Amino acid sequence: MMAACIAAENGAAVVLLEKNAIIGKKLLITGKGRCNITNDCTRDEFIKNTPGNGRFMHSAFSMFDNRALMDFFESRGLKLKVERGGRVFPDNDEALSVVQVFKVALETAAVEVVTNCEVRKITKMAENITVESSRGQYLANAVVIATGGMSYPLTGSTGAGWKFASELGLTVIEPRASLVPLESADNWLREVQGLSLRNVKATLIYNEKVIAEEFGELLFTHFGLSGPTILTLSRELVGKTITPGAVRLEINLKPALTMEILDARLMRDFAKNSRKMLKNGFAELLPLSLINPFLSLLSVSANKQLAQLTKAERQQILDLLQKFPVNINGVRPIAEAIVTAGGVSVKELNPKTMECKTIANVYFAGETIDVDAYTGGFNLQIAFSSGYAAGMAAGKCEK
């Protein structure tokens, strides 16, 4: 949509072929329906938060960065707001408003939008490019391929762009899940599914080595773990062999407290409720649904009186509060990934225009390219910036 708008604003006659019945279908579900369009951070921070070929985006970001994107929406009447972590959302929390801006922009720029149109093949001819679709054949001076990755296939993302790229002779880096929930077979998970923990520290351990840490929010699900911290950490498992016992996540449930301060709090709480049994001593310390799973991981009887706890038993509780383990046995399918890594090799694209180096007037944008970032608005900015660069260049193409 961005590429089409910019190409048309540069004087090109543009046709947007949309596989779905409506435009922006996938955009509607981003950010839990609120659409985290970008992040209010510096350009260097954008690159830092784009571990998958972030440097490739330097030129595109210099042409159209987060400030330019925010101005794009606000100048068209969409008020924005910045939340924790620099995440930028529509002020009304409605992704539909973002799609509406594009709908109006496309109409204003006289872009012909053809919905329910599935592209089946793209062929580079001597003088033009042939696009074969379910709605007939189109001839074009330039083509921008922005079909997304393979996550959420019900929204139309089925990896078609990579098929077109391969047929055109381009190198496609094997697609894989990037930001994706983690699976666990721990039996106690069913007791806490739906529980969200905020302001916790999650540490990912692979073969007894710490490979990544994140602070923030996580969610317990029926299959394992999800939420912002989990999605970010999941990228570290891409390409790694996950065997039984090889991976676990340790959650620091009280990261703001040192061991000494946490111990002092425990002693204070336990002294105040000295006659209570251990199973009744965590009401002020843990979410209700997490208490039984927590107790099950202790080698202390849940029926033991708090006053009878030894120093060693209290230390065991302290250790568990700071290193609550969840065994990880895999990642969810690529179809459930928020973002997919892999795609058209950046070595075969011009970073200033997103044009194929070996095929004139064929451009790629968004998740079709082998660029991926962490959660927080970074991936949508990549889509918008690459779309802008491609649209700007494609809009100036001549036969």
Image (spheres, rainbow, N blue to C red):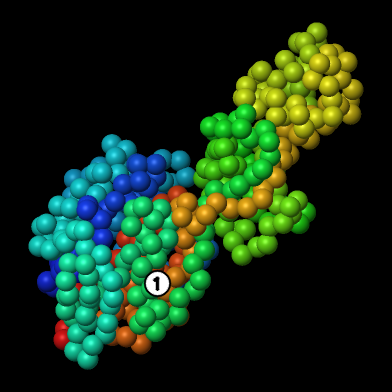
* 206 displayed left or right of 308: left
Q: Nearer the viewer, residue 126 or 222?
A: 222
* 228 displayed left or right of 88: right
- The crowd level at tag 1 (other Cα within 10 Å; few <14, some 14-19, many 20+) is many
Residue 120: image location, x then y, percent: 28, 71
Q: Considering the numbered disc 1 on the image, is that residue within a helix, a strand or a loop?
A: helix
* 287 displayed left or right of 78: right
Image position of 304 with respect to 234: above or below: above
Residue 106: image location, x then y, percent: 16, 58
Residue 68: image location, x then y, percent: 29, 58
**Residue drawn at (37%, 47%) of the image:** 30
Q: Quadrant of the C terminus?
A: bottom left
Quarter of the image holding residue 291?
top right
Res 210 seen here: no
Q: Nearer the viewer, residue 6 or 279?
A: 279
**Residue drawn at (58%, 53%) of the image:** 331
**Residue drawn at (28%, 77%) of the image:** 122
Q: Nearer the viewer, residue 234 or 158?
A: 158
Quarter of the image holding residue 61?
bottom left
Residue furthest bottom in the image: 126
How many circles with numbers are drawn on the protein?
1
Image position of 389 with respect to 206: above or below: below
Amino acid type of disc 1? Answer: Trp
Quarter of the image holding residue 124?
bottom left
Instruction: Name the residue beneath numbered marker 1.
Output: 162
Image position of 398 with respect to 65: above or below: below
Residue 296: image location, x then y, percent: 76, 29
* 135 displayed left or right of 219: left
Res 285 seen here: yes
Q: Quadrant of the N terminus?
A: bottom left
**Residue drawn at (57%, 57%) of the image:** 235
